[in-house]
Amino acid sequence: MNSSLETAAHPENLRRVAIEPVSRVEGHGKVTILLDDANQVQQVRLHIVEFRGFEKFIEGRPYWEVPVMVQRLCGICPVSHNLAAAKAFDLIVGAKQITPTAEKIRRLMHYGQMLQSHALHLYHLCSPDLLFGFDSEVALRNIVGVAQRYPDAAKRGILLRKYGQEVIRITSGKRVHGTGAIPGGVNKSVSLEERDLLKKDIDEIVAWGVASVQMVKDLHRQNPALYDHFGSFRAGMMSLTGKNGALDFYDGTLRVRDANGAMLFDGVDYQQYESLIEEEVKPWSYMKFPYLKSIGSENGWYRVGPLSRIQNCDVIPTPLAELERKEFIAYSEGPMHAPLGYHWTRMIELLHAAETIRDLLDDPDIHGKDLVVKGQRAHEGVGVIEAPRGTLFHHYQVDDNDLVTMCNLIVSTTNNNQAMNEAIRTVARQYLSGNEITEGLLNHVEVAIRAFDPCLSCATHALGKMPLTAELVDAEGRLVHSLTRE
Amino acid sequence: MRAATLLIGYGNPSRGDDALGPAAIDAIERLAAQHPAWGKVEVVTDFQLQIEFVTDLAERERIVFIDAAASGAEPFSFGPLEAKEDASITTHALSPASLLTVFRNFHGEDAPPSFLLGIKGYDFDLGVPLSAAAQRNLEAAVAMLEQWLSANCAASLCHA
């Protein structure tokens, strides 16, 4: 159910705290918190401050350009958009079944991305909070601080990310803007020399995956009161699952469980996603709020990403990650809803990605020459994958002139929109109500948002365009206090 | 053996003048064939700088970062770059100065001599081409960089 803190009864009488933009997330977000005279929280909202308009950007373009073009939506997970678009356009070019080589190259690319994205998130963006504390000294709470105090962990993060990027470079042909996945297949396979380059380090990568899970698991065990309850709220869980309910980031059918873990939907063909999901527009945010159509917007919102995927699947098809999944499930005795559980499950996924890469590097199909198939042309296709941040939908219609006439994207962060709002409202109630606002307390709100690893915008970053300021503004709009991250 | 000179142009080619960094790299690649005396010059483009770039910076004689600048001098600014922690250290996209700081912590020594070329841009909207003014600034910046490379480098171009 939606939180009562979404809209205050009399916002005009309240003090306003803004965290703008939220740091250590991709893109620009803003949190506003309205407080009454007793510093009790009355309203909390996560806003997206930039209108993206990507769908209109895509419409009118030739369809074959789109899998490359959509990579520019995001500087962090371009591969996700490339693959989701390619899967949608597979159907439009009549490639109902791509070749084994094409599918395995796509998987290799995708699992490489999962590895690099999850490593970046934990080691660069979140480990400062987790290792030093949410209200620790600001100057220390960053990757440089981690590198000084925990040099091995910092190096591990950088080299895991580097390895994932190498997998992407080799499978897509270029470091960025590669044309790895194209409608009907892929542009290249992996040579023996390229495979050997990746194989050289993969055992160490898997070992670092194990160490990464251990690091987060230890944090949970050392402070269960914090890790198991911080910002915790109940929510349903949605993800793709593969054959036999296995964890699968690349393909499968849609599964939704309720907050108790009971199955609501299973085996839903994502071509029919519009029968399952609807999106609500709220006047205060550019980002839509998806929900399960059959339940309605009030109670039908859900959570996506690692915390959902690991609890939604029945098994992980690689041995080390499966052991970790079982331990995680046993630990929480019922679904874990605490946002900090994202970190634990994200590292289980990182380990699974590393193990899958190792398996794929031993698969002779990745060297195949049969790369592309085509069949009877169609006019519509939906592509869905599990991106690092959660379920990603790409839906296109194409006319007889090969131009895109309709594009609908539901990105992972949009799927988590209501859930992120619920998380920060819970944290605001737990930590902010009745207290004077400090940077450390505001960081608690950001910690809850960062747990979801949201991607709020795309990769514009020109010099001079990245202010990071939190302001406390009174009901008349006067600046009371300002905190700037130098 | 790694190339002595590394040029990193970054920005989103679909975001108007944010494409200035990659566009400068394209222009330098075209010019390189005319300048065998530049020696080994490696070029890299990306949307944004990230932590793993510290592995690209090692074992160079010089590094030039090239980015669009929303503020600053016209047509461009160019100068040496020092390691510095700034707000970008907490984001997905590092500034070049922050990257040099991460380099120092990762490698235990200062990064090779580094320079920042900031080319003034004006319009960063999604889907728009380079603005005419940015195009002029790009040409001026590339001409300067061509001279600078001729003065500072020696031997063949290779790609990342």
Image (tube, rainbow, N blue to C red):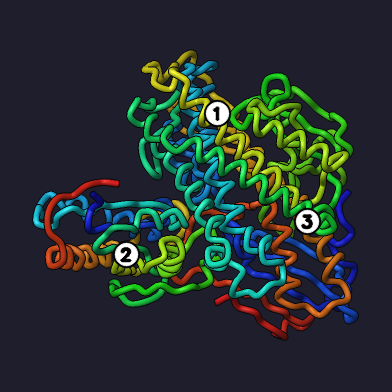
* Helix, strand or loop status at disc 1: helix
The span from disc 3 to disc 2 (Cα, nearest Å) is 54 Å
Q: Quadrant of residue A149?
A: bottom right
B124 or A224: nearer the viewer: A224
Residue at the image position 40 percent from the left and 45 percent from the top: A176
The residue singled out by tag 3 in the image is A222
- Whether residues under marks 3 and 2 lie with C-beta atoms below 8 angstroms apart, the answer is no
Q: Position of residue A178 (x, y in %)?
A: 39, 39
| Secondary structure category for the residue under label 2 | helix
Q: Which mark is residue A104?
A: none
Inspect the image, locate mark 1, and give the three-letter code of the amino acid beneath it: Ala
**Closer to the observer: label 3 or label 1?**
3
Q: On the picture, is A142 further left or further right than A171?
A: right
Three-letter amino acid code of the residue under disc 2: Ala
Name the residue that disc number 2 marks.
B134
**Crowd band around label 3 with a 10 angstrom C-alpha radius: few (<14), some (14–19), many (20+):** few
- Element type where label 3 sits in the image: helix
Does residue A437 appear left or right of residue B50 in this picture?
Answer: right
**Residue marked by disc 1:** A88
Q: Nearer the viewer, residue A46 or A212?
A: A212
Few, some or many residues within 10 Å of mark 1 (<14, 14–19, 20+): many
Q: Mark 3 or mark 2: which is in front?
A: 3
Q: Residue at x 69, y 54 (%)?
A: A451
- Spot occupied by residue A356 in the image (x, y as percentages of width and height): 56, 30
- N-terminal of the pair, mark 3 or mark 1, is 1
* Residue kind at label 3, given as amino acid type: Gln
Cα–Cα span, label 3 and label 1: 45 Å
**Residue B55 visible in the current orientation:** yes
In this view, the residue in front, B152 or A478, is B152
Q: Nearer the viewer, residue A244 or B122?
A: A244
The answer as to whether the residues below labels 3 and 2 share one chain is: no
